[in-house]
Image (cartoon, grey):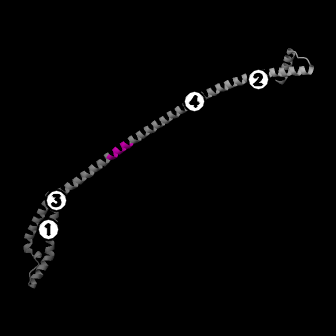
Amino acid sequence: MKRAISYALNAVATGVVLGGGSVAAQAAEEGGAAMPQLDFSTYPSQLFWLAVTFAVLFVLMWKVALPRVGDVIDMRAKKITDDLAAIEAATQEIEKISTEIDKVMASARSDAQDVLRKASEKVAADHVKKQDKIDAELAAKAAEAEANIAAATETAIEGLRQVAEEVAASSVEKLTGRPAAKDELASALDAAAGKGG
């Protein structure tokens, strides 16, 4: 910093010596007043006030303005850091919630599939029970019907045999004029039934 000030003062002094002397000499020759900023007699006071002003501004910047700017920069950096931390925490919370939701959804799907499977198995078991019951009832009714048919057939055959004996006895009596013997009729009917069966 001191080096920059000395460079600036050297540059000003060199410019004044090189260019200022000729301007002052020219102004003196013309008989008029020289430009005040190029008058060497005012340089020490100008340099003094330049140094004082620079020092005051430097101290004001160093002690007042720059700390405030630094504080603002620090506050912004802290806010940005806090915001980034909050975003990171929110992201982690969202991921955690998302994972929990996925677990709950998977559990719900599994439970729903179990309920559907159990309901399907129960319906199938009920259907099998009902089908078995209906099959048993139909088998019992079929057996009963077969027994009834067999009994009706036996009754019909017995009745038919009696009718056949009566018809045969009546026919033999009409043809021969004498009644037929029951033993002969029974053996003839048995023989006819044997050929027909």
Q: Residues within 10 Å of mark 2 (few under 14, many from 20)?
A: few
Given residues 77 and 9, the one toward you in this image is 77
Q: Quadrant of residue 126?
A: top right
For discs 2 and 3, the disc positioned in front in the rendered view: 2
Q: Sequence-wise, which precedes: disc 1 or disc 2?
A: 1
Q: Quadrant of residue 178?
A: top right
The range drawn in magenta is: 90-98
Q: Which residue is mark 2?
A: 156
Specify whether residue 104 is in view: yes
Q: Residue at x 13, y 64 (%)?
A: 54
Checking the image for residue 65, the label placed there is 3
Q: Which residue is mark 4?
A: 130
Specify whether residue 194 is in view: no
- Percent x, y for residue 118? 50, 33
Position of 129 compared to 10: left or right?
right
Task: Residue at the far bottom: name it.
Answer: 30
For discs 3 and 1, the disc positioned in front in the rendered view: 3
Asked if marks 3 and 1 touch (Cβ < 8 Å), the reply is no
For discs 1 and 2, the disc positioned in front in the rendered view: 2
Q: Sequence-wise, which precedes: disc 3 or disc 4?
A: 3
Tell me the SS state at disc 3: helix
Quote the CA–CA distance across marks 2 and 3: 131 Å
- Helix, strand or loop: magenta stretch: helix
- Three-letter amino acid code at disc 1? Leu
Checking the image for residue 9, the label placed there is 1
Q: Residue at x 9, y 72 (%)?
A: 43
Quote the CA–CA distance across marks 1 and 4: 116 Å
